Amino acid sequence: MRRIRKAVLPVAGLGTRFLPATKAMPKEMLTVVDRPVIQHAVQEALASGIEQLIFVTGRGKTAIEDHFDHAFELEATLAARGKTDALQTVEATNFPPGTIAYVRQQEPLGLGHAVWCARHVIGDEPFAVLLPDDIILGDQPCLAQLLEVYNGLDAPGANLIGVEGVEPEMTRKFGVLDIDHWHEDGVSFTAKGIVEKPEPEDAPSNMAVFGRYILDNSVLKHLDRQESGAGGEIQLTDAIDASIRDGVETLGHLCEGRRFDCGSKEGFVLANVAYALNDGVIGPGLKPAIKALVDDERS
Ligand code: G1P
């Protein structure tokens, strides 16, 4: 097995669900407590040992590039004023040169197409994909959990996909795995297929893909065909399914932690509440205030 060094983060989406907030600002820059949504995924990837992040961007996304760069004036001002903590917070968003590469997806042709746009930067290695809308609150970074499982596999190449059980009526919002058999650990299974957004009656299981993948490089070969699938888009799910049919071992794994879908208003607000409550500084004071709000709502 080859080491996973690179991670692709597709960030080209328009964020129409959050208009007007996203009129002049990328949706990935909306904040969950004190940092943009995208920073949560970036921190997860780096804390999991990823060395290079490949952002697939589009028009109007330069705020993301600026966020992960030096901010000379701000840093100089903070240094001159002795604001060491704030300076450290800002410096922590800047990584060694070459850590982040940016490629453009010129047309919104789907998630599979976005990943395919990164193919030359990925090269011939297996790689991770993190969908930054999904953020996971837990003790161990979700990608680190997946990498631990991946590194213990014997297969020469494999796909490993983070999954969670969903209510049957929710399958139409996700990629869903077809389970071949569960492993003894009770949290991993071998998959024999994967379908994008099936109706509940067609869903092979309720094991839904959320935004964390480790993929065999052969998935890129399938994306080369540029075939569109569900919703008329080029789907990553279809390329993974094709690689399963080629014999690439593919596992689903239930990660520990609580997932929030920051691509929806409800998920985004809930993420803010959960991360705020989890914050050692503001959490304790917020808890009774949020409880009082909910109680007021009830009465
Ligand atoms: C994408 C994937 C889907 C996956 C989901 C997770 O869908 O295509 O397979 O389950 O992300 O968030 P999207 O939410 O972009 O429509």
Image (cartoon, rainbow, N blue to C red):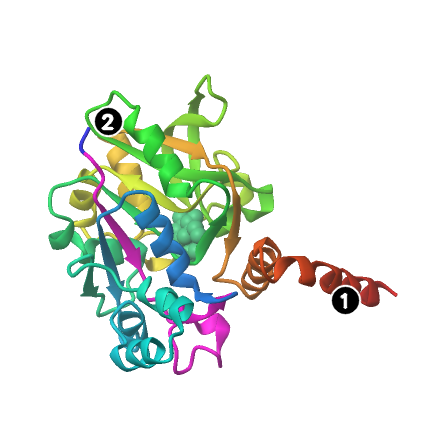
Residue 77 drawn at (x, y percent): 33, 81
Residue interval drawn in magenta: 3-32
Q: Give the amino acid at mark 2.
A: Gly
Q: Gap between marks 1 and 2, in whole Å?
A: 53 Å
Residue 11 part of the magenta-drawn span: yes
Image check: 123 left or right of 86? left
Q: Residue at x 40, y 33 (%)?
A: 252
Q: Residue at x 46, y 16 (%)?
A: 184
Question: In the figure, residue 269 lies in which quadrant?
Answer: bottom right
Sort mark 2 into few (<14), some (14-19) or many (20+) by Cα contacts within 10 Å.
few
The kind of secondary structure element at disc 1 is helix
The residue that label 2 is drawn on is 247
Image check: 187 left or right of 193? right
Q: Is residue 111 above or below residue 247?
A: below
**Quadrant including the C terminus:** bottom right
Q: Which mark is residue 293?
A: 1
The kind of secondary structure element at disc 2 is loop
Q: Nearer the viewer, residue 161 or 227?
A: 161
